[in-house]
Image (cartoon, rainbow, N blue to C red):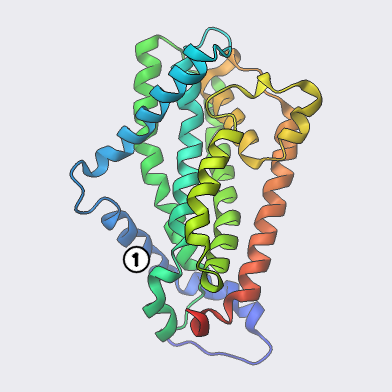
Amino acid sequence: MSTIIEAGHANRNYWYDLWRFRELFLFLTWRDILVRYKQTVFGILWSVLRPVMTMLVFTFVFGKIARLPTEGDVPYALLVFAAILPWQMFSNALQESSNSLIGNEGLISKVYFPRIILPISSIITSAVDFCISFVVFLAMMIFWGVGFHIQLLLLPLFVFLSLLTAIGAGLVISALNVSFRDFRYIIPFIVQFGLYVSPVGFSSSVVPEKWRLLYSLNPMVGVIDGFRWCLLGENVQFYWPGFWASIAAVIVLLYSGLKIFRGMERSFADKI
């Protein structure tokens, strides 16, 4: 593959280059999937163990000790697991993408390609864990006798929204991590903090009505509420104003991520 760099046409050619380097994108994605659980004792079982253990802890803390209400007749464990699905995908994607540029410094310093391929390819691999966890969730629904609903057809929309949220945040963090290596220590704190301020262990309906729209500016609120609505059906009351607020927040985050990443991309090879 030959690459022609024309003066004054960088922005126009950049997005076309994403298509030209699609094979590199697929290769990097497949590589990340293969090495994800390499040399681990439990291997891909971690995709099941992590969400299940989180569900057990949150169900005990929020459901048994704090006695927060569930939605309808849904078991509290299912309410939590329905939120863990998108949250795990988002948090895994954010952590993987944040180090994607630094982890490929040899490739960045020697070969030209759109650098945005690296964080996005690492984000896509988080969908593998999601698919495995989703199968476990379906098994839990059957076990508890919770039926499937027509809203389930809209689930891909919220999966896509979760990935867009991860891409926007991942582009910002990965770009800043090249210049400021402190971010590698900040990311775990951000993920942990986000876990507790997002409605993972509880229903967003417990948030006072006057604050709920503001609370929905957290883009993961609309995603999590959407997952619960699609998976648990009429048991969950969907807060549409909050959904549109979350959509707006995702758009702003994605635009900001692209703007910051493209602005800093030229200096990656020198700083890395």
Judge left or right: residue 130 versus residue 239.
Answer: left
Q: Measuring from the top left, give residue 71's x and y in whole percent.
A: 58, 13
The quadrant of the image that shows the N terminus is: bottom left
Q: Secondary structure at mark 1?
A: helix
Q: Nearer the viewer, residue 205 or 222?
A: 205
Hey, which residue is sitting farthest top in the picture? 73
Within 10 angstroms of label 1, few (less than 14), some, or many (20 or more) residues?
A: few
Residue located at (39% from left, 52% from top) = 125
Placement of 169 over or under 213, stated as above or below: below
Q: Measuring from the top left, give residue 243's x and y in whole percent.
A: 70, 34
The answer to which image quadrant residue 24 occupies is bottom left
- Looking at the rendered structure, the number of numbered marks drawn on it comes to 1
Hey, which residue is sitting farthest bottom in the picture? 7
Q: Nearer the viewer, residue 257 or 179?
A: 179
Residue type marked 1 = Phe
Residue located at (68% from left, 67% from top) = 259
Q: Measuring from the top left, give residue 50's x and y in whole percent.
A: 35, 35
Residue located at (59% from left, 29% from top) = 199
Hey, which residue is sitting farthest right in the picture? 210
Q: Nearer the viewer, residue 203 or 34?
A: 203
Residue located at (22% from left, 44% from top) = 43
Q: Measuring from the top left, give residue 161's x and y in whole percent.
A: 59, 43
Judge left or right: residue 18 versus residue 12.
Answer: left
Identify residue for label 1: 27
Placement of 78 over or under 2, stated as above or below: above
